[in-house]
Amino acid sequence: MSFAPPSNAYGSARPCLQPIAGVAKNLFLVCSLCYCCVIFIFRGRAGRRWRRDRYTDCEMARRRQRGGGRHQPVRLVLCPDRDVRAAAISGKGMGVVACRDLPPNSRLAYVGRIIDRPALQRLCERAKREPARRLTAYLMAEGRAGFYIDAHPRRRERTASWIAGLVNEPARGATANMIIGRQRLAHDNGLIRPVLITVRCVKAGDELTIKYGNGCTRAYTAGRAPAKPAWLRR
């Protein structure tokens, strides 16, 4: 004995709802994809470009520092002739000035000829014979032990990327706006290189300054070194 399934008042309507359910499902997927695209654009690189057009770099840095200054600002790698340029500074000779407003944590790589310890000793002996040429005034320790970077502007192999060697010290009574740091450079076989890092906003046209160590011989009185910011100590 067989029984027929119970009748359902909505049974005849179910086949009509299937196309509508399919359209609704596709519409949900399209909306989800559009939402993900919007989030990626406004929170990714395109969003950063949009915010950079709306705010200046210094304004963006101040917005990030509202949490007490502990969060590190976004690193900005400075390029010669685009972000910074060499210029004549009154009373100092050649120096480096900003081409545009530079936010904190803007980094300028210290580039020059890499020499080893024997070459450094020969350079020091030559500097004693020719003190007016200041042959050892542009030396900085490299990331590897026993190697140094010579960014002397009179070297024949000098290029535009050696501009960091022209950064002067601050005048008497002034405070420098950069400090010396170390950074691992991916494009340089992952080696740790010295970089000059801005600790505050630098306006367009202002000079970049840094206080070198006590080993720097100087015939003048330099200004003060800035305090290391909290976001750089993390």
Image (cartoon, rainbow, N blue to C red):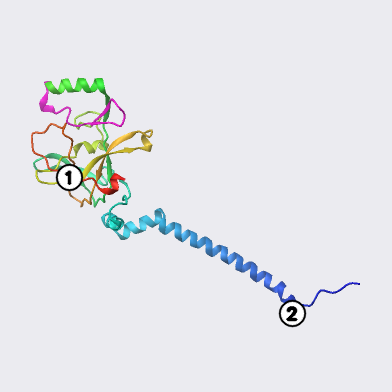
Rendered location of residue 156, percent (x, y): 23, 28
From the image, which quarter does the N terminus lie in? bottom right
Q: Name the residue under label 1.
A: 176
Taking 68 as reference, is 108 above or below it? Answer: above
**Of residues 185 and 143, which is closer to you in this image?**
143
Rendered location of residue 213, percent (x, y): 18, 35
Q: Is residue 166 visible?
A: yes
Which corner quadrant of the image does residue 186 belong to? Answer: top left
Which residue type does callout 1 highlight? Ala
Which residue type does callout 2 highlight? Ala
- 134 within the magenta span: yes
Residue density around tag 2, few if under 14, some if 14–19, many if 20 or more, within 10 Å: few
Q: How many labels does the image show?
A: 2
Q: Secondary structure beneath disc 2?
A: loop
Residue density around tag 1, few if under 14, some if 14–19, many if 20 or more, within 10 Å: many
Q: Do the residues labelled 2 and 1 touch (CB within 8 Å)?
A: no
**Of residues 115 and 221, which is closer to you in this image?**
221
Q: Distance between the residues labelled 2 and 1?
A: 83 Å
Which corner quadrant of the image does residue 65 belong to? Answer: bottom left
Residue at point 26%, 55% (across, down): 58
Rendered location of residue 5, percent (x, y): 81, 74
Rendered location of residue 81, percent (x, y): 25, 44
- 204 within the magenta span: no
Q: Can residue 77 be seen in this view?
A: no
Give the extent of the magenta segment. Answer: 129-150
Residue at point 27%, 48% (across, down): 230
Which circle marks residue 9 in the picture? 2
Q: Which residue lies furthest to the bottom in this view?
A: 9
Sequence-wise, the earlier of marks 2 and 1 is: 2
Residue at point 26%, 32% (across, down): 112
Q: Residue furthest right?
A: 1
Which circle marks residue 35 in the picture? none
